[in-house]
Amino acid sequence: MSTAQPPGRRRRPGQLETEIVTVLGAASGPLTPGEVRDIVDPTGSLSYSTVVTTLTRLHEKGSVTRSRDGRAFRYGALSDPAGLVADRMSRLLAVEADRASVLRRFVSTLTDSDERVLRDLLREPDAP
């Protein structure tokens, strides 16, 4: 499941987090940062420290577990990529005082299909 970037191309904001959570979710058990890096980018162009920093941030957000394994940590997924995006959207919305305007503009950018999905979700009774 290599998601290595072509030379000279940067990942979109949040893309590496999503790739890492996807790798952790597909793994049979918790992985070390080195194992994560080798799966995400087998070419070795992704730095180990970038993976460690991203895993640490994901742990601080509550998106991954972390357990000590000797001198290293092993990480496992607590969330899925959709959960990460939803958390990101919630954090962005939380810092805006005029939430109605933000939501109105967001909804105005949805495709007809996505708008139907959102309307259906809003009609669903709250799950217990």
Image (tube, helix red, strand yellow):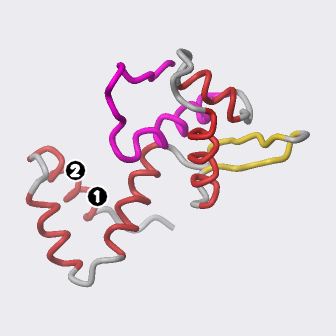
Horizontal placement of 94 versus 53: left or right? Answer: left
Instruction: Residue 14: give x, y in percent of width and height.
Output: 41, 46
Look at label 2 and name its amino acid: Val
Instruction: Residue 60: give x, y in percent of width and height.
Output: 62, 60
Q: What residue lies at 23% left-to-right and 78% top-to-bottom?
A: 99
- How many residues crowd around disc 2 within 10 Å: few (fewer than 14), some, or many (20 or more)? few
Most extreme residue toward the top, as rendered?
43
Q: Write the start and end of the magenta stretch as one range.
A: 1-27
Most extreme residue toward the bottom, as rendered?
97
- How many residues crowd around disc 1 within 10 Å: few (fewer than 14), some, or many (20 or more)? few
Residue 5 vertical position relative to residue 101 in the rendered view, above or below: above
Residue 36 got which mark?
none
- Depth order, front residue of 119/82: 82
Most extreme residue toward the front, as rendered?
8
Residue 82 vertical position relative to residue 102 in the rendered view, above or below: above
- Depth order, front residue of 43/24: 43
Instruction: Please say if the residues under marks 1 and 2 sit with CB atoms less than 8 Å apart.
Output: yes
Residue 117 got which mark?
2
Q: What residue lies at 32% left-to-right and 28% top-to-bottom?
A: 9
Classify mark 1: helix, strand or loop.
helix
Horizontal placement of 27 versus 105: left or right? Answer: right
Instruction: Residue 96: give x, y in percent of width and height.
Output: 28, 78
Instruction: Residue 18: give x, y in percent of width and height.
Output: 46, 40
Residue 121 got which mark?
1
Say whether residue 15 is magenta: yes
Q: What residue lies at 53% left-to-right and 28% top-to-bottom?
A: 46
Classify mark 2: helix, strand or loop.
helix
Q: How far is disc 1 from disc 2 in space, using C-alphas?
A: 6 Å
Count of numbered circles on the image: 2
Look at label 1 and name its amino acid: Leu
Say whether residue 48 is magenta: no
Q: What residue lies at 18% left-to-right and 78% top-to-bottom?
A: 100
